[in-house]
Amino acid sequence: MNVKSLRSALSSYVFLLPALVLLVVFTLYPVLYGSYLGFTEYTATNFATNQPPKWVGLDNFRTLANDDLFKTGVLNSLKYLLVVPALQLASLAVAVLVNRQLPFIAFFRAAYYVPVITSISLAAVMWDWIYNKDGTLNWLLKGLHLMNPNSNESWLLDPNTAFWAIMFVTFWKGFGYYMVLYMAGLQTIPEELEEAARLDGATPWHVFWRITVPLMQPTILLCSLLSTLSAIRVLEEVLVFTNGTGGPLNSTYTALLYVYKKSFGGLDFNYGLASAAGLVVAAIALILSVLNFRYFREGSARA
Amino acid sequence: MTRIVAAAPRAAATPRTARRPLRRTLNTVLIYAVLIGIFIFAAFPLIWTFIISITDSNSVTTGHTVYDFPASLFPARITVANFFNVVRTYPAIERAFFNSVIISGLSIVLTVIISALAAYPLARNEFWGKAVIFGVIVATMVLPTETSFLVNMLSLAHLRQIPVIGPLLGIGSYLGVVLPTVSTAFGIFLMRQAFLSIPQSLLEAARIDGAREGQIFARIMLPLSMPSMAALSIFTLVNTWNSYFWPSIALTGSQDKFPLAVEMLKLKGAFNDNIFNTAAGAMIMMIPILLLFLFAQRFFMRGLEGATK
């Protein structure tokens, strides 16, 4: 009996070994070592000459506190959170809309998901044409008389609009993803509940706010959490749309772009400082997660 | 059937039912108008890019650029010449396509194998340390990974210095891009769910017949989990085919191994003067993944839903 259970345990470890080794080396260790690097002085030169990181305490964080570029990045990352409520409301509404039996509905669901499987570099190519001074957006706005016909707005080159233009692409790329998650959540709501409300004369608007939304609390928490975390961690969008420059007058510079520029994307190669900046972003992400839980737990308690 | 029966008495009882069919029709029209509106919003960039990619660049008679909207949506002459053009004048795209296939293929095979192996004991065996190991895997989902790319890059640089296998695993190698991404809690959970749903009696019967763990895994668990493995494969393919940031830094110094997603932006720069070629290049990247998605979207979406439970 003992031999048998020992053998079963041994085989279990063997099965788990590849996954665990890779998780430890490429997921756990980077987090621990990266956190440690945040408190050290460590550069590409140190790395090349095999010198260990030098402990400097809070020095890097003091440098960050005095760096206007980092402050711009953090503020922009926080500003990026504005995409979250828009994205969540829109995708929940679309999920409710497509969560019914109608001819061709499967086609629409699939089509709404296509932006999700579009790579960010492809999105950058396509939206560049839309935001171009001769692009579709200006054509549309001029056609609707919302823009001066002689105006030559180039949305990605204007420091006042570049940030919002990029955020809109995040919205475009994301709403199909959350739509699918919300559709999965909607399946768990008993149909009779909504039907009963409708028979009692409730308008679709009431059904949505009074029944669907409260019953969807767990899914809303999950989606809002995922969306908040990816908004505060936004990097690829600002990287590809501005060729890694941070946009006109640094208007699209975000906190993680700072981490990237200080490590490999610029001329600094200051791994210690980059790691410290990463820790600050991680701390903000953690606080936002806690707030998310607080807010939606309370919400569900009230409902 | 029941709906008709139930509706009949109400139709007789209320006077406003005469307007019902009309209102229902209006409602349907309204719903489809909204659906089509969102469709245009979601699909327009891709549709437009596709149309540009098949427009004969010599036939743009309405002006000098494709920006002559909406005329550019209805090209006077359709051609596939742009695709040949882009391959001829930008040979790197062929290699990039090949690189994307290799990187995605390696990722899929390794992800499915590693996830399935790890999921099996977690779903089916009791052993010392199981709770701790499961806890560690869960923990990897909520870790602050902001600087992981940095440390992983340094690790790959170290790996590169190992003799013989260094060039295969280290920075600038195909495996170097792939290895950090193939072991994920997502994949392990997805496979664990699949294994948990297989009846215990089947395993017991196999054990009584003297089957070893490896045999049970390969002969029973894997074949019965095909749908989940397919979902995980498609999910991994879409992710790796499209990923831009990690390959662009993990392949530093080996530009000949860049996948399409990274090469794409260079292509745009190279063809700034020829939007038709850029569009054709974009389609070369998009069409394989789009066809696969349309073909397997049920699996794919189910995989995504399964991961949230």
Image (spheres, rainbow, N blue to C red):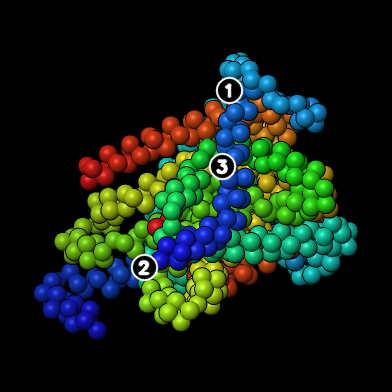
Q: Which residue has dot 1 on it? A: A71
Spatial CA distance of label 3 from label 1 is: 28 Å
Task: Give whichever of discs 2 and 1 has the lower sequence position.
Answer: 1
Which residue is painted at 22% across and 42% down in the image?
A302
Q: Which residue has dot 2 on it? A: A100
Spatial CA distance of label 2 from label 1 is: 46 Å
- Residue sitting nearer the eye, A20 or A66: A20
- For the N terminus of chain B, the quadrant is bottom left
Q: Taking B80 as reference, is A93 left or right?
A: left
Q: Taking B94 as reference, is B66 left or right?
A: left
Chain ID of residue with mark 3? A
Which picture quadrant has residue B309?
Answer: bottom left
**What secondary structure is marked by label 2?**
loop
- Residue B181: % across, % down: 62, 52
Which residue is painted at 14% across and 75% down in the image?
B10
Which picture quadrant has residue A203?
Answer: bottom left
Let me know if marks 3 and 1 both belong to one chain.
Answer: yes
Q: Which residue has dot 3 on it? A: A28
- Residue A251: % across, % down: 63, 30
Can residue B176 be seen in the rendering of this structure? yes
Can residue B187 be seen in the rendering of this structure? no
Pair 3/2: label in front: 3
The amino acid marked with disc number 3 is Leu
Which residue is painted at 66% across and 26% down in the image?
A272
